[in-house]
Image: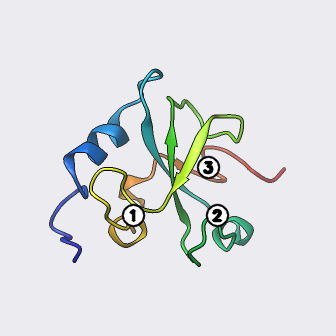
Amino acid sequence: MIDKNLKYCCDFFESRHRSYNHSWPNIMIVKYTHDFFINTNLSKNKINSPYRFWITFGHEVFSLDNVMINITYCPFCGKNLFEFYDSDEYVNEIEGKTFSMIK
């Protein structure tokens, strides 16, 4: 069950999401605006959401050149990230505003 009164699914997720440390894994939430990226299944689950969740090692601006791991569940508490984070409030980057995938 998802408790929407919590701002983050767990304290560990919050600390990794708020951190921009280049020597420790961070969690980045990216919102995509093009249907190609929203409907692309990056995992076995069929997810129709503009949000994607990445583990990175520090990030300034989203880039496919960055080392990243796409995740669906919180690596700390196991909650489904797509069920918990469904608002732009948590987004670090927005495709088309802070970076572009299509030129």
The relative height of residue 23 versus residue 1 in the rendered view (above or below) is: above
Say which label, 3 or 1, has the lower sequence index. 1
Say which label, 2 or 3, has the lower sequence index. 2
Left or right for 89, reference 92: left
| Element at label 1 | helix
Q: How far, Cα to Cα, is label 2 from label 3?
A: 22 Å
Quarter of the image for the N terminus: give it: bottom left
Where is mark 1, residue-wise? 81
Label 3 or label 1, whichever lies nearer to me, is 1
Label 2 or label 3, whichever lies nearer to me, is 2
Where is mark 3, residue-wise? 97
Where is mark 2, residue-wise? 42
**Percent x, y of residue 102:** 80, 53
**Percent x, y of residue 101:** 75, 50
Residue drawn at (64%, 34%) of the image: 66
Say which label, 2 or 1, has the lower sequence index. 2
CB under 8 Å between discs 3 and 1: no
Disc 3 crowd rating (10 Å Cα; few below 14, some 14-19, many 20+) is few
